[in-house]
Image: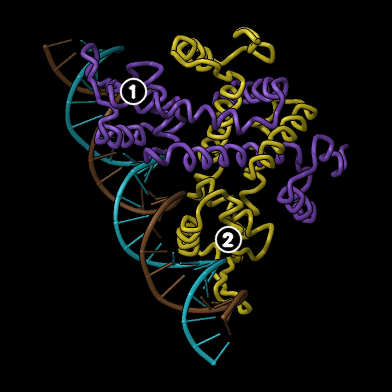
Chain colours: A yellow, B purple, C brown, D cyan
Amino acid sequence: MDDIYSFDEYGELLPEEKDTINQLTKAPIESLNMHSISVVTNLYRAAQGLRNKMEREVLAKHGLSWTSFSFLYDLWIWESVETKKLALSAGVSKATISNITNTLERKELCYRKVDNRDRRITCVVLTDKGRKVMEELYPRFHEGEVEVVSSLSVEEQKLISGLLRRVIRENDF
Amino acid sequence: MDDIYSFDEYGELLPEEKDTINQLTKAPIESLNMHSISVVTNLYRAAQGLRNKMEREVLAKHGLSWTSFSFLYDLWIWESVETKKLALSAGVSKATISNITNTLERKELCYRKVDNRDRRITCVVLTDKGRKVMEELYPRFHEGEVEVVSSLSVEEQKLISGLLRRVIRENDF
DNA sequence: TTAATATCGTTTCAATGCTAACGATTATGA
DNA sequence: TCATAATCGTTAGCATTGAAACGATATTAA
């Protein structure tokens, strides 16, 4: 079995991780998988930090949330997107997509278009104004992306992408 | 320079990644760092999937959100926690912590305690009922953690934790 | 001491987000 | 054909979330 100190193998533990391990090992819980805990904790913390940084440094100027931006991003890439696909892509409910569509429609960044072949389906389309916003915003966003992972080498970036990709695929995320 | 197909080195790309790359390389944007895009995209997607899975499969029974759970978790580990630390730990604003405290106080899972040395500071403490909820919930949550990363070997789990930890540290997340 | 500044938690308000219920549309099957 | 089921987006109702404004408390400086 691994002892606790082997966690340091790939880099000094974060203070929060040390605290947690110290407390949990005192608790009456046996056979905890410390490695899983570390992966999940650091995964969510990194993602949350990423989101906060982007909203603060890039998206706040245009009053956009992370979800709104990923919504516009999909429209930018795909021209016309079904709401169902938007929900799946952002990992939010279809009700949320409906609300965000309303907000962005009010800002004149997109509009709805009913599918004539199947009138149950609604597509969302980027307006010219929306396209302009994305053309201004995306380069800044991309700068942020590069910055966030700049402490990793290209090889390490490929490695972590591959590992995350397997997690996503295995869990149908 | 890397050509596009080198992305597959560490596992077949997700359909969404392929679409994005195909579209972006047509767009008039030069010198995009595709590796950064993959890391950021997969990082957020994995975290979002993780959160949704846990809320659906573990936390819904008790009507708790991910943030509420991490809030209670901190109280469980730390007994008495300042609201400021709770906000920092969860990566949310102090307003959010204030609201969550209200909700969990209503459920009698925690209570506020004003610091007598500095009456501006408020600490939050777990109630006995709150402790019972955590003792029931945490083992289930941990099962979920183990399950989510079960497709990775222990060595890979250590590796990804280490890489994420460096991202967190370098960005002060 | 006292005035100015800083810090902390709460409140306000709008946006985000989910579940469940709903109405409209399409598909299925007797 | 026509009733039933399935699927889609919206709505209703509520909890979560953050920025900004606010009051209360503490610190600093004159």
Q: Which residue is pictured at 31% across the width and 22% down the height?
A: B126
The crowding category of the residue bearing disc 2, from other C-alpha atoms within 10 Å (few below 14, some 14 to 19, many at least 20), is some
From the viewer's perspective, is the residue at label 2 or at label 1 nearer? 1
**The quadrant where residue C10 appears:** top left
| x, y percent for residue A50 | 57, 35
Location of mark 1 (residue): B131
Using the rendered image of the protein, determine whether residue A111 is visible from the camera's viewpoint: no
Tell me the quadrant of the picture where the N terminus of chain B can be found. top right
Q: Which residue is pictured at 69% across the width and 32% down the height?
A: B151
Decide: is B59 above or below B155: below
The local secondary structure at tag 2 comes to helix
The local secondary structure at tag 1 comes to helix
| x, y percent for residue A102 | 46, 62
In the visual, does B109 lie left or right of A92?
left
Using the rendered image of the protein, determine whether residue A136 is visible from the camera's viewpoint: yes
Amino acid on which the number 1 mark rests in the picture? Arg
Location of mark 2 (residue): A84
Decide: is A83 above or below B9: below
Q: Numbered disc 2: what chain?
A: A
Decide: is B77 above or below D15: above
| x, y percent for residue C5 | 31, 23
Decide: is B151 above or below A117: above
In the visual, does B76 lie left or right of A63?
left
In front here: C2 or A26?
A: A26
Q: Numbered disc 1: what chain?
A: B
Amino acid on which the number 2 mark rests in the picture? Lys
- Give the total of numbered labels: 2
